[in-house]
Image (cartoon, rainbow, N blue to C red):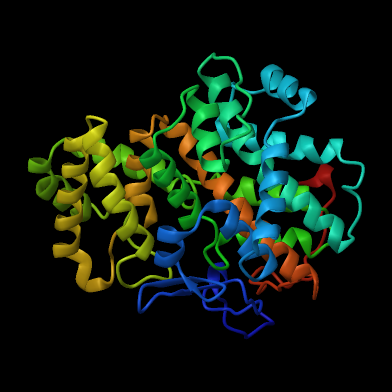
Amino acid sequence: MPDDQEVHKGLEGIIVNETKIGYVDGQKGRLVYRGYDIETLASKSNFEEVSYLLINGKLPSREQFSEFNRKARERMKLPGNVVEFIEKNCGHSHPMSDLRTVVSFLGALDANSNSSDLNLQKSMGEDIIFRMPGIVAAIKRKWEGKSIIEPLPDLGMAANFLYMSSGRKPTEEEEKVMDTCLILHADHGSNASTFSSMVTISTLADMYSALTAGIATLKGPLHGGANEQALKMIKRVGSPENAERVIGEMLGKKEKVMGFGHRVYKVYDPRARILKEFARSISAKSGKQELFETAEAIEKAMISKVGGKGIFPNVDFYSGMVYESLGFEENIFTPIFAFSRSAGWVARSLEYVSDNRLFRPRSKYSGEMGPIEYVPLEKR
């Protein structure tokens, strides 16, 4: 072992970048976007405005917001060749595989995708964000064997996403819940998928490549797929009466209880607090009240057993329940996550490449030093 430096598996605790975009305070349970607390943005803003904030560093003026909205509503309608591509190629693997492939296909259609010009990169990034609701909704419809629906010109991104997914205009409450979910998931520090996007953009690759990398990373069950697993676990517990026993058995076997614990938060995830109240309300109206009560009983059991270790509900615990109450199957949960996180991926990629340095970490070698004598194949 020629290198005597300490190994930080997963880069835990290593500072790789300086950012002005977002901050996660794991000790106080705060999430900040450009200086704004997440609770403020969730209650007063919308996804379009938050996307603008993350990318541009400040909230838009009326004129800037109008122009950003105009572009969003114009580009939500997918080009015919993209719709044709989804109809021909999607619906066979996991929807995250479909999403990864469609975003990569968008890059193949863009004549500017080989350029590292910062303004072009920003334009590409915005284009991907604006197309995300249409892409994810189209993939959902394809999986259900239904025709793809075009957006309505008078609806914003959250409402149009629900409309294109279901064919029904959402209620004001449904739109607010969806908008809030998108805001809560838009950015969250140097998480695995964001870091993956930044590593890719650091090579001066295009924004399509950066977001394709982010989507590929988000697919894993330890990252974006955790909300699917959390909902499955809640359903497996079955009822509030079973929570104490099942959770005790899982902890006794050292099984991971999905939706609990976080690498950064050592207190209650502020996003989970917001989603819990939405889950309480919308599950009751969608006939899933027992599901929420089961989740709440699981939360109580977990906090009593491991809360002292800093293990509390994270954003994944209640988000799956909210999505199901809005009419989404479990396999669409992570694509929705990707739709919202696209804003953070674009913002962080632009920020990093504007003062770029190619990522090039080192590994500590622990193999044979040799020299080992080579034995020809015929003598082995």
Which of the pair 314/305 is nearer the observer?
314
The quadrant the N terminus occupies is bottom right
How many marks the image carries: the answer is 0
User: Is 8 left or right of 195, judged from the image as shown?
Assistant: left
Say if 120 sits above or below 291 in the image.
Answer: below
Residue at the far front: name it: 62
Say if 377 sits above or below 9 in the image.
Answer: above
Name which residue lies at 21% across and 42% down: 292
User: Is 202 left or right of 306, judged from the image as shown?
Assistant: right
Say if 316 sits above or below 362 in the image.
Answer: above
Residue 359 seen in this snapshot: no
Which of the pair 81/367 is nearer the observer?
81
Residue at the far bottom: name it: 4
Say if 324 sits above or below 267 in the image.
Answer: above
Percent position (x, y) of residue 33?
53, 69
Percent position (x, y) of residue 174?
39, 39
Name which residue lies at 42% across and 29% down: 329
Which of the pair 225/280 is nearer the observer?
280
Percent position (x, y) of residue 100?
66, 39
- Quarter of the view holding residue 202: bottom right
Name which residue lies at 56% across and 30% down: 137
Name which residue lies at 75% across and 39% down: 104
Percent position (x, y) of residue 297?
14, 49
Residue 49 seen in this snapshot: yes
